[in-house]
Amino acid sequence: MTNLKTAKRSPTRQPAESMKPVIDPADWTGEQLTRETDWQFTLSDIEIGEIDAAVAGIRARGLDIKDITLADFPLPTLDAKLAEIRQQIMEGRGVSLLRGIPVERYDMAEAAAAYWGIGLRVGTPVSQNHNGHLLGHVYDLTGPSRDGPSTRAYHTSAYLNYHSDSCDVVGLLCLQPARTGGMSSVASSVAIYNEMLRRRPDLVAELVKPWYRDRRNEIPPGKDPWFELPVFCFAEGYFSCSWHNYYIRSTQRFETLPRFTPAQTEALEMMDILADELKHETDFRPGDIQFLHNHVIVHGRTQYEDWPEEHRKRHLLRLWLATPGGRPLPKAVLERYVGLKPGQRPAGIVVENMDLKTPLTPE
């Protein structure tokens, strides 16, 4: 079901071409997103009751989270709203917020089941790291430092640069917010591209070229510790953005790769500047689910300070989702993934001898 308010306000997508302005419903500014509410959804009591019943059914059957299917998690009334949310993510603004998951009365297994059942309405979960985690925990395990090629930013309390993840859609369910900080910042990469094209087309010309990306020691069999992909991509009349900000910069640790030119450095800096200019910030509440379409949205996070009590520490559950039938992507994206064939969706992180799992504690 299409969100009619979105259809009235959003521009109709037109075929996208490199080095020309992109007309796409996902072109918005933070000011516009603050003013509009058609991307935000709240659960009704009836819909929450359906989730409760579906969670109870999973609990009674003793199903592992990763084994839950759509048939195992019926949501007869809520399905219409979730279809509208998917439409907003995939064909509209590229961002959606769902509020009201009753996490305060769920244990971890129940919260994960509820999140998984909702996430299946958006896409198919894929691995988020070399451990094969289909369910991720955004939780501070190491403190504010991001040093070290194997350190994962989502296991720190550090500021996270704007970036897009290695999947079609990323979802975050808030179980517990931070004591201070930890604001989620999102920006339209369509708007970033269009504004950079207006101000500095010479820098857009740099970003449509291939860029090296650091695999950060998550290296598939037979692959280099890096791969190449443009930041601004065009395929079959569709724009997409692949902004692995930190991983692009960290390729400079490889002495065999070329150093950044002055123009490349300036292009990287302008991506950050424009993302910050165009951002919308969200203060997560317990029970919020944020979904982002990585091909048209970049996201980041402010540094945060946690509560001293273990049970009050900031904790988000994360899903990386593949969306069959999604936005066409360039052929260069195939090098990023193992065994990916033309037309298939980004498959997350795949390494040798990996077992897929859905851990219920951060690890």
Image (spheres, helix red, strand yellow):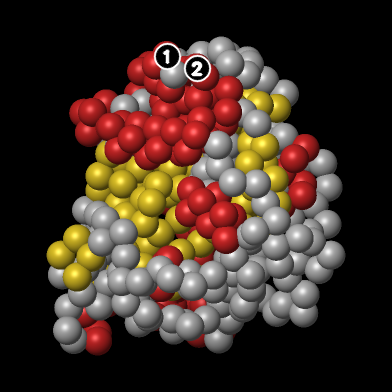
Say if residue 193 shows up in the picture. Answer: yes
Q: Measured from the top left, where is residue 48 in percent x and y?
A: 33, 61
Which residue is more in the foreground, 248 or 127?
248
Q: Which residue is mark 2?
A: 201
Q: Secondary structure at mark 2?
A: helix
Identified by mark 1, the residue type is Arg
Residue visible at 28% across and 32% down?
A: 277
Are dots 2 and 1 in contact, CB under 8 Å?
Answer: no
Q: Measured along the vertical axis of the image, is residue 145 above or below residue 227?
A: below
Dividing the picture into quarters, in which one does residue 67 lie?
bottom right
Identified by mark 2, the residue type is Pro
Q: Measured from the top left, where is residue 319 in percent x and y?
A: 51, 62
Q: Measured from the top left, where is residue 318 in percent x and y?
A: 46, 64
Residue visible at 77% across and 47% down?
A: 334
Residue visible at 56% across and 13% down?
A: 20
Q: Which residue is mark 1?
A: 198
Which residue is more in the foreground, 332 or 207?
207
Q: Measured along the vertical axis of the image, is residue 106 above or below residue 81?
A: below
Dividing the picture into quarters, in which one does residue 13 lie?
top right
Which residue is more in the foreground, 35 or 98?
35
